């Protein structure tokens, strides 16, 4: 098996050079080398490192980029890669954010991408929302042990014409229209913005 880009990193070990800062008060976030994750069957999507978040805490474990800068009446695309570990398990329904677009001043969340975990069916669904919580979900559930390309098309509008589209592996799966954004977006976050303590396992993130 070939492993291209082994010496390229999107997330450097022990740091987040591509990101402005991180928030991880419960110490659940790290940036393992592929040799550390290969033992559990996970290789970074591209490069030698990825970001790993341990679930099971209500506190955030995320990296923050203050250079998103989506002005009013402007459209931008953002993309990352998501891997749901084989060890992800949950005994209660849970909804959690994995990416947020926020105002630079005050940090108000304008829109978000998140996961919905349904205990009765063991389904993991991805969706988007106007504000912090995802409300509209893809009809196609995600499965464990594979990388997904997750892309958002964000159009900011303070006059009620904003839109948010979610693309999974290049296919538009969910769309929200006529969103009213209170202000331009300046910051973006990636990681896990809180989960139930009964939700366990690991999520992996990579950048392209």
Image (cartoon, rainbow, N blue to C red):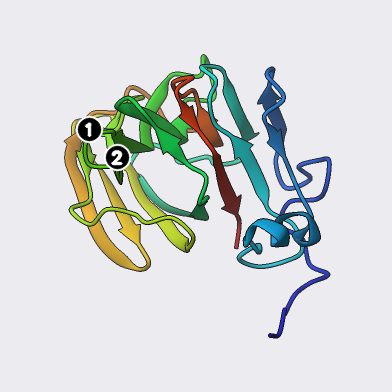
Q: Earlier in the sequence, mark 1 or mark 2?
A: 2
In this rendering, the answer to whether 41 lies above or below 159 is: below
In the image shown, does 113 or 110 lie closer to the viewer?
Answer: 113
Q: CA distance from mark 1 to mark 2?
A: 6 Å
Q: At 65% from the left edge and 62% from the top edge, which residue is drawn?
A: 44
* Nearest to the observer: residue 56 or residue 39: 39
**Left or right, residue 65 beside residue 183:** right
Q: Position of residue 206 (x, y in %)?
A: 60, 55
Name the residue carrying label 1.
135
Q: Position of residue 67 (x, y in %)?
A: 61, 40
The residue at the far bottom in this view is 1
- Give SS at disc 2: strand
* Residue 169 sits above or below residue 174 on the image: below
Q: Which residue is mark 2?
A: 128
Q: Quadrant of residue 198?
A: top left
Within 10 Å of disc 2 (Cα), the crowding (few <14, some 14-19, many 20+) is: many
In the displayed structure, does residue 141 sit left or right of residue 186?
left
Residue 178 vs residue 35, the one in the foreground: 35
Contact check, label 1 and label 2, Cβ < 8 Å:
yes
Q: Would residue 188 be seen by someone viewing this image from the given angle?
A: no
Against 109, residue 75 (above or below) is below
Q: Residue 204: give x, y in percent of width and height.
A: 58, 49
């Amino acid at each position: 098996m070939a492993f291209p880009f082994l010496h390229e990193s999107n997330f450097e070990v022990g740091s987040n050079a591509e990101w402005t800062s991180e928030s991880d008060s419960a110490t659940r976030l790290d940036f393992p080398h592929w040799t550390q994750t290969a033992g559990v069957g996970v290789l970074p999507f591209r490069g030698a490192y990825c970001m790993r978040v341990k679930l099971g805490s209500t506190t955030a474990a995320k990296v923050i980029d203050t250079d998103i800068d989506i002005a009013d009446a402007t459209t931008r695309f953002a993309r990352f890669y998501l891997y749901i570990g084989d060890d992800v398990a949950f005994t209660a329904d849970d909804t959690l954010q994995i990416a947020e677009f926020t105002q630079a001043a005050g940090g108000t969340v304008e829109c978000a991408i998140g996961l919905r975990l349904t205990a009765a069916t063991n389904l993991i669904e991805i969706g988007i929302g106007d504000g912090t919580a995802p409300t509209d979900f893809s009809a196609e559930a995600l499965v464990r042990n594979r990388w997904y390309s997750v892309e958002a098309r964000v159009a900011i509008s303070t006059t009620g014409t904003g839109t948010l589209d979610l693309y999974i592996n290049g296919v538009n799966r969910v769309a929200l229209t006529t969103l009213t954004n209170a202000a331009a977006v300046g910051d973006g976050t990636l990681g896990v913005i809180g989960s139930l303590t009964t939700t366990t396992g690991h999520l992996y993130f990579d950048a392209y």
